Each structure stands twice: as C-alpha cells, then as structure tokens.
Image: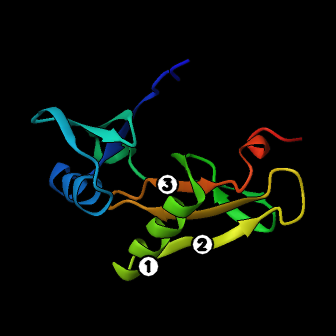
Amino acid sequence: MTRPRFHLAFPVHDLAQARSFYGGLLGCAEGRSSPDWVDFDFFGHQIVAHLSPEEAGHRRTSAVDGEDVPVRHFGVILELDAWKALADRLTAAGVKFIIAPQIRFQGQPGEQATLFFLDPSGNALEFKAFADDAMVFAR
C-alpha cells in the first residue's frame, strides 16, 4: 500500500532564504510558486513556505527526555543511514543545532536518533530515525 503524502504550510520571513535553505541545504526540489509562496518536495511530501514574517519562528518548548523541544516543529523520519548522512552534512555546513544529533530514549521503547535545528525564519525542524521501525509508535 502506498502511504499518503502530508501537506504542510508554514510561515517564513523571506522566500529567497527559504529557497536557499530548503532547496540548497536540504536538497528539496522546488515545485510551484508565486510572489508569496513556494512549494517544496520535502522527502516525498509537500511543504509550502508562505511569506508571513509576523508568524514565523518557534516560541515555546516542552521537556522531552531532558531536552527543551520546540513545541511547533516538523520533519521526517529517515532510515538510520540517511539520518547519519544528513547529520554529517548539516554539521559540515555549520548548522547550529537546537538539539545536537543524539539518541533519545536509549534502551526504552521508542529509542530514536534525533536532531533539531532552525530554518532561517526560526521554524524548528526535527529529523529522526529508528533502528527498528516497529519502535515508531512503541509505548
């Protein structure tokens, strides 16, 4: 069965910066656009950066396994090797992590590799991976 694709629209300060970040750094192909928004292929899903500077950026955090996780964030679950490659690429590019690449919930159900960083508009992204895909929804 094919999995459905998600669609997410989010605010940004500057579309040129969004294009550079999502298209350049993350390698997301650009789709349709207008002077006020741009679509990206975000690992097979559709995200849309809308020009809305007053709404951009994260504001609150929540404690998760000893870390202050941005409440509003998005991302994808990658295969572990792809996650490691992305973590290395982001590190080499000098990306400042909110939460550095690490293993969360070690030895517990839901153990996962995770990392958090901000886009140029202050939107928080999380990329994670599971050594065992059965752990994605483990309790």
Residue placed under numbered mark 1 in the picture: 91
Image coordinates for residue 109, horizontal then vertical, percent: 88, 51
User: Which quarter of the figure has residue 70?
Assistant: bottom right
Residue under the point 72% across and 68% down: 103
Q: Position of residue 110 (x, y in %)?
A: 81, 51
- The answer to whether 112 appears left or right of 59 in the picture is right
Residue at position x 38%, y 48% in the image: 56
**Label 2 sits on what residue type?**
Pro
Judged from the image, the secondary structure of the residue bearing numbered disc 2 is strand
* Spatial CA span between label 3 and label 2: 12 Å
Q: How far is disc 1 from disc 3 in space, using C-alphas?
A: 15 Å
Q: Position of residue 51 (x, y in %)?
A: 24, 41
Discs 2, 1 touching: Cβ within 8 Å: yes
Q: Earlier in the sequence, mark 3 or mark 2?
A: 2
Q: Specify the amino acid type for callout 1.
A: Thr
User: Helix, strand, or loop for circle 1?
Assistant: helix
In the orientation shown, which residue stands out farthest toward the top?
A: 1
Identify residue for label 3.
Answer: 125
Tell me the residue at 45%/65% (across/down). Answer: 86
Residue topped by disc 2? 101
Q: Quick one: label 2, few (<14), some, or many (20+) residues within 10 Å?
A: many
**Whether residue 88 is situated above or below residue 30 in the rendered picture:** below
Q: CA distance from mark 2 to mark 1?
A: 9 Å
Q: Are marks 3 and 2 in contact (CB under 8 Å)?
A: no
Residue at horizontal 38%, vertical 38%? 10
Three-letter code for the amino acid on which mark 3 is drawn: Leu
Tell me the SS state at disc 3.
Answer: strand
